Amino acid sequence: MGHQRPNTRSKGKRNRGDDCADVAAEIYRNVLSTRQVTKDDVNQLYMIWKPACQGCRINTKDNPNCFCGLIPPQNGNRKSGLWQKTSEVVNALGSDPSDDCRASPETPAGLTNLGATCYANSILQCLYMNKSFREGVFSIEPDVLKQQPVLDQLARLFAKLHLYKMAFVDSAPFIQTLELDNGVQQDGHEFLTLLFSLLERCLSRSSVLKARTIVQDLFRGGVSHVTMCSKCGNESEASSKIEDFYELELNVKGLKSLDESLDDYLSVEELQGDNQYYCDSCATRVDATRSIKLRSLPAVLNFQLKRCIFLPNTTTRKKISSAFCFPEELNMTQRISEHFQSELIYDLSAILIHKGSAANSGHYVAHIKNENTQQWWEFDDEHVSNLGCQPFGKGSSHSAVKPSQTEQLDHSSSDVIIENGNGPDAGERQASKTDATEVKTFSSCDAYMLMYVLRRPKNCDKMPIDSSGYIEEKEACTSSEVDSHLPPHLYEEVEKLNDSYVDSCEQYKMKKESEVNCITERRLEVRSILSKAAVQSPAEFYFWISMDWLRLWADNIVPSIIDNSSIQCTHGKVPVSKIGSMKRLSSEAWTMLFSKYGGGPVLAKDDYCVDCLFGVAQSMALADNYRDRRTLMKEFAEAALAGDCVDEKLYYISKPWLQQWLRRKNVDSPCEADAGPTASIRCPHGQLMPEQASGARRVLIPETLWNFTREIAMAVKPGDSVGCSTFFSDSEPCTQCSIQLTEVACLEDTLREFKLKQRQSHEKLAMGKGIPILPGIRYYLLPSSWLSKWKSYSNASGKNAPAELETLDDVIGFLMCEKHSRLLERPPDLACKRGSIFQKSPATDTLTIITDDDWKLFCEDWGGTAAKGITAEIDFLGNDFVGSSEDMAISEEHMNLNDESNIGPESRRFIIKISPEVCEECIAERKICELKRKLNYSDEDICVCFIRGKEPPKSVLEASVNSLEPNRRTSKRSRKTAFGNSVKLNVSGSTSVYQLKMMIWEAFGIVKENQVLHKGSLVIDGESACLADLNIFPGDVLWVTDSEIHEHRDIADELSGQKMEERKTEEGFRGTLLSSSLSSQFVSEASACLN
């Protein structure tokens, strides 16, 4: 084997710190002996001789000439203060208002979401981006606006969207005017319908035709519900009635495109059989057809896609998320009831999108086309994004191009499709054109409402169209201007807001520049002064400055005045003890600091404190003396502990105290631990404690050591006569304490003998062994809990011995009912093992069978009356028993005792006869009370296992019947097993099955409709029952399987839907101005009163 190379890395090196300490100690000794302090002594003790270091990673405390680490490197920074990143300093000023500036005048502005008002924001953006509607709102007279708060706030909102320089507009005034609850999500289509109705009522007071009928002129069309007799061909009288519509509600379920939905909407229904129609002309019930006919179309045609359907089984609404196709260009010429020469071509102008899988929650956004630039924009509350020339953006990952005539549309992957035509009658419509044109078709799974605008013929604006084909020119829709101008009062209001916004941007900019300039100047100042801080030569004049203040000055943006009070002694000088808390500053650097910040006190080169220096020298001399004496005393202490004391007068001292005193190292003066060397060996009577007492170990020490320990103890605790009591070597222990200790020892000996006797007298019971039970012999029953305590008591020793046991008479009394004086517990079960009869489960039974001898001995030792015992006898069925059945009760069942190993002929049926007999009435009442108490639980755990196979393992079924061990520690996290996962769920007796299923959904991801929940072999049905009703107790094990019938969905949708129901969203817009049937005049008057 090779030799290990010795470690020579530190060989020949000296510890520089120890060297400095040795030099300082020598100087202090010379100062104390000569009573003089020289300049060299000051230079050494105040470490003036040390050079100004460069490049230290941290500031060195033992060098007053080190200024390193006060500031970061040239390009470095810190987390806070003067040297943090400039960007973080700017962020502390708050958000920059200019970040919210509109990118360009052509970029639309967004609307703030007040919580759940995205539905209103999207609809308002669709209305504002319609130029004709916007012009109509701006044309309302100021007097009408003052009378109608809804119109006034709508005009103000449109004006801000039109000219405001911020990228978004606050929608709160308009939302609050409508009295909408901004925390409840509502239906966008319902909001638009009610808003149109409210606007019509409010606009009716305007005398400007363009404004008064703007809603009807742009959005109102007409339909008829036509019923035609199949026999005579006459239409019903109601068929001629034209009903107004503002949007067409189209089915989506099972339909793939807008053309299919329109065909479904306009389809003919056959009325036959029980649904026959009574024809007035034929005067009888006849077959007929019923259909919807479009009589007139508006300039803006809205299609409401019915994506939300009602599920009667669950009384909830569900959203249809299937893909739906719609064209960029829609030809409605063939859809209107009577055709005319000019084509009715509509262009897609807006798409209202509902994101999310739930019907009662989600998020609304709008994709809208600018009429002037033909650019599409996405309006997502405050955020507005340019989509280019396509409604879903050019860079959409779902875009594709497919010919509709040759391939079937794949709605799951395509958003943009090029079609040769438009719908089922595309060929018919193309025949009227010279050249076939391609029409783009878009697909979306979330499109909720489509808005189409009638294409203007040449030299004509968009007009409402009726079945006669006549285009009526109205003031409301005639406009040759590119854009409308704001009314003067709205223009002035928006300009004031813009001026205020520009002013806030300028103020922020100035504040930012000021802060940045201040930080830059401070950094230059700090670097400049620190570069001149070091004293260059020994003869140069210098000043002392507090390191704490210097560090704060170098770190803070706004420093305080100079504060040197922390480095000034009571003599008004600089003490040598503060050398680690101050720095030596050059005269030039001090002048720069003092002239700017002032403060003080001024501590210069010659302000070292001689008095404090002499005090330190004296303290060091005392410490040296104490260390030398302690070193000498340690030898005496070690000898005393070894039993080798010098031949002189001896004293008792606490042995643990002396051992601890020896272990202490590097002690320069007495400390708190040196107090009380004899406190633990002094008894309450002021005498020497007997050594047998706890903690009273002692040792003899010589008089020299005793005098030293007493001296240091009294120095720490003057006047401590108790802790420094003197005990000579011939001191006798306290007589009273000795007698008490002897009595205690006698009692302990007696108790040990008694426990030994108990174990010997009841050997089998003490060892937990069962006793064989013979028929016809009397036995006794004892509570198993008392026997368990008895075994612990008999086997325990020392400090861990349990308290005395209850007397047997008390224990037996607890087993009897007060009403009938009968037994409240049933006898234990028996089992036959190897030809002998034993108690089946003595470890878990409430009662334990003991022999007659054990009972008598227990009565003698534990206060029992032999006659009050509970007797038990075993006999075969069919034998003649001693006594009648009235005297001896029979157990609740006749036991078939099977030998577990050798089943012989002796295996017969037995009964247990006990006296007094069992009180079945009281036992039943007690069980009912226990069951009620058990069911009335809260914050307890049950275990749920997720079974992936068809059948659960046997272990799960058994655990479902038998509760888990109550004291067993188990994890509450989902735990993987061989058959699936298991998880602990915290429930109460009042927890419903629905709530339990929601917990299981969250734990395993199983939709509650797919959960098949079991307890053992029992299936748990329904959702309204609580766990207590189903006898599900704490610790029970349930198992669940996934039927996979219903499609997976996010639990957040269920929770949000539940929350919406709790907030009574079924009330819709009830309580708002949108649902109010009051006149607009009343609304304006009420608003005026509020203002």
Image (spheres, rainbow, N blue to C red):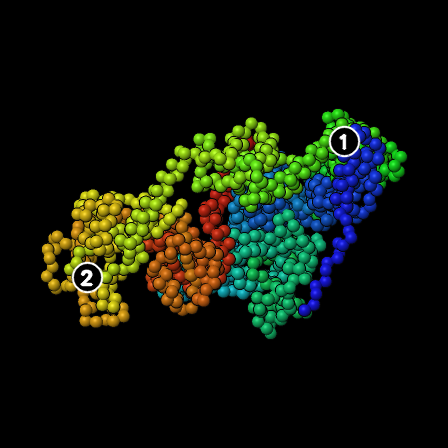
Looking at the image, can residue 491 be seen?
no
The residue labelled by disc 1 is 32
Q: Confirm or deny contact between disc 1 and disc 2 (CB under 8 A).
A: no
Instruction: Report whether 757 appears left or right of 546.
Output: left
**Which mark is drawn over residue 1091?**
none
The residue at the point 26 percent across, 44 percent down is 807
Q: Amino acid at mark 2?
A: Leu
SS category of the residue bearing label 1 = helix
Q: Looking at the image, which is closer to me, 431 or 55? A: 55
The residue at the point 54 percent across, 56 percent down is 356
Q: Looking at the image, which is closer to me, 663 or 894? A: 663
Looking at the image, can residue 645 be seen?
yes
Mark pair 1, 2: CA separation: 99 Å
Number of residues whose C-alpha sits closer than 10 Å to that of mark 2, classed few (under 14), some (14–19) or many (20 or more): some
Tag 2 or tag 1, which sits nearer the N-term? 1
Q: Residue furthest top?
A: 571
Number of residues whose C-alpha sits closer than 10 Å to that of mark 1, classed few (under 14), some (14–19) or many (20 or more): some
Instruction: Report whether 484 appears left or right of 451.
Output: right
Instruction: Report whether 238 appears left or right of 208.
Output: left
Q: Position of residue 764 (x, y in %)?
A: 28, 57
Q: Amino acid at mark 1?
A: Leu
In what quadrant of the picture does the C terminus appear? top right
**Which mark is drawn over residue 774?**
2
SS category of the residue bearing label 2 = loop
The residue at the point 23 percent across, 55 percent down is 850
Q: How many marks?
A: 2
